[in-house]
Amino acid sequence: MESSSRSWVRGRRIGNGSFGAVNLAFDKSTGEAFAVKSVALHSSNRTPMLALENEIGILKSLSSPHIVEYLGDDTSREQDGGGACRNLHVEFMPGGTLANLAAEKKQQQNCPVNELEVRAYARCVARALRYLHTVAGVVHCDVKGRNVLLGRVPGAAKLADFGSAVRISGENKLNWARGTPLWMAPEVARGERPRPTSDVWSLGCTVIETVTGAQPWPELKHKEAEAAMFHIGYSGELPEFPFQISKLGMDFLEKCLRRDAGERWTAEQLLQHPFLAEASISMEESPRGVLDWANSDFDNWEEDNCSMDSELGVSDSIDPITCGRERVRELASTRGIVCWDGEGWEEVRSAEKGNLQEEEEEEDTNCCSGVGCSVSSPCASSCSRCFAGDVICRHGIGLDCDLLLDWCEFLLHLKMIINMILFYFSLCS
């Protein structure tokens, strides 16, 4: 298939947007993978085409790391005789949709999405909404799990599908009802003009969907769209909050799902709610111990926390977690000699007076004084292995010295690890 902007090949279908099919596609010259949403030009129903043109126009004007990236658009003619298509090119998100993830988790022995992940995904959507509402002047109008696309890393998500989106300052329309009924805010279900807090209601419904693996308003699932919208718009009821969520999550949902749009929190306010403010976590593979934790990649964690601090106006200060992590990283590192001196350590065991005197006398010694020992340290004249061996030999203990040395070394390492674990948990508490 030839394109006016690039030469590309259409691959398998990977989903359906609100008004068009979505396929995986490949650029012939670069091999780059991207997603293409297409609508047939010859269709008698003009609604999908109008929605796609609306999405193209809005996506062109957006630039946010939390919104799927616009890569181009074109018109193409299908080689299989399918006719001409209008195409929108966007970045490919390999993780699928948030709705699919939640449904899959539910099927796996009814195991819901971990709440830390729920918070991370909700934070991404809230950031996207803050950008749309305060910078771009856009209301998405169809926030739901199917329109939240996931990346390769758990916890990373982007908002997609702007076919229903409207400009906040746009012209008035006769019918403002748009989006998916079970995620609609009451005012939108009544046919009123969508506003930024209408997206906030939909975000609350999306959190319910993520936690339960099912649509909000399950009692309305099999009703006609008009009946469901009437109930949402005029009943005065709220969707049921999931029992699986924490009290913090319940409070977050209460801020999102207020029937009076003027009383709902904004996306900016939600980003300061503890349910989202504490979701700045690394979603990488969990470390198996303190040493794994120290040596793990914290670039994304630090970047996210820096951005969170700038959002909340937090001044620069010494971060105890960072200091502790650097200390533990020194212990875990094999790239150099560990220096035990310096500020930041608390003394938990004093050396005996004799050892302190020897340390002062041989302050410049860089190697262990034990015969044949290659252990070097700028802070001690003998290593733990040789010190233990010296004690054993001096007291004439009639046991296998090598075996006892190994046990002594093991116990010393074990004690060090336990101390580091206690130190780590003290930082987290």
Image: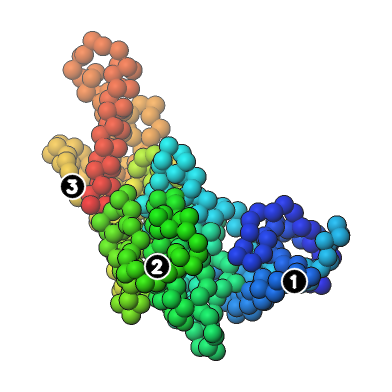
Tell me the CA gap for discs 3 and 1. Answer: 79 Å
Type of residue at label 3? Glu
* Callout 1 amino acid: Ser
Separation of residues labelled 3 and 2 (CA atoms):
62 Å
The mark that comes first in sequence, 3 or 1, is: 1
Decide: marks 3, 2 in contact (CB < 8 A)? no
Residue at (27, 28) in percent of width and height: 411
Q: What crowding class fits label 2: few (fewer than 14 Cα within 10 Å), some (14-19), or many (20 or more)?
A: many
- Check the image and name the residue furthest to the left: 353
Q: Say which of marks 3 and 2 sits in front.
A: 2
Residue 224, position in %: x, y?
Answer: 50, 62
Residue 245's spot in the image, x, y percent?
A: 31, 53
Residue at image mark 1: 44
Quadrant of residue 269 within the rendered picture = bottom left
Q: Where is residue 221 in the image (x, y as percent from the top left)?
A: 46, 56
Task: Report which residue position mark 3 lands on.
Answer: 347
Q: Which of marks 2 and 1 is nearer the N terminus?
A: 1
Quick check: can you spot residue 73?
A: yes
**Mark 3, mark 1: which one is toward the viewer?**
1
Q: Earlier in the sequence, mark 3 or mark 2?
A: 2
Whether pointer 3 and pointer 1 mark residues with C-beta atoms closer than 8 Å, the reply is no
* Residue 49 lies in quadrant: bottom right
Q: Name the residue under label 2.
A: 232
Residue 251 is left or right of residue 36, and the answer is left
> Residue 377's image quarter?
top left
- Image height of 95 relative to 318, above or below: above
- Where disc 1 sits, the SS reads loop
